[in-house]
Amino acid sequence: MENMAEVKGEVRLSVLVWVDLGRRRVEEWRKWWLGCSGSAVAGGLGAVALLWLEAWLWRCESLKDWGEREIRD
């Protein structure tokens, strides 16, 4: 039974690390998009990518909140 608790803790920690890495990647994309905003095509593609990444980040934040709640419990 202790092994199961240890595995669950490792999975929760993995989710938190994954979310933090995802947040960093979104910030990198955001910087890229701001750099491309001078070109209409690149700016448009960047805007679409940014919207998708923002939705993904929101989902990641939800996973992070879930992981933090699980760790507290």
Image (cartoon, grey):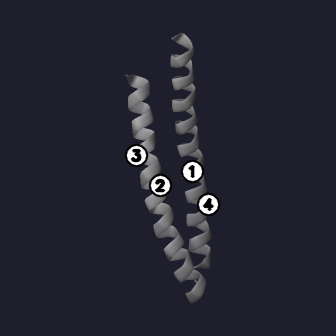
Which circle marks residue 28 in the picture? 4
Q: Vertical placement of 73 versus 16: above or below?
A: above
Amino acid type, label 4: Glu
User: Residue at image x 61%, y 60%?
Assistant: 28
Of residues 17 and 27, the one nearer the viewer is 17
The secondary structure type at the circle numbered 3 is helix
Q: Vertical placement of 40 versus 7: above or below?
A: below
User: Residue at image x 43%, y 32%?
Assistant: 68
Q: Which residue is mark 1?
A: 22
Q: Nearer the viewer, mark 4 or mark 2?
A: 2
Q: Earlier in the sequence, mark 1 or mark 2?
A: 1
Residue extending farthest top: 2
Q: Vertical placement of 46 versus 73: above or below?
A: below
- Whole-angstrom CA distance, mark 1 to mark 3, is 13 Å
Q: Which residue is mark 2?
A: 57
User: Residue at image x 51%, y 62%?
Assistant: 53
Which circle marks residue 62 in the picture? 3
Mark 3, Cα crowd under 10 Å, few <14 / some 14-19 / many 20+, is: few
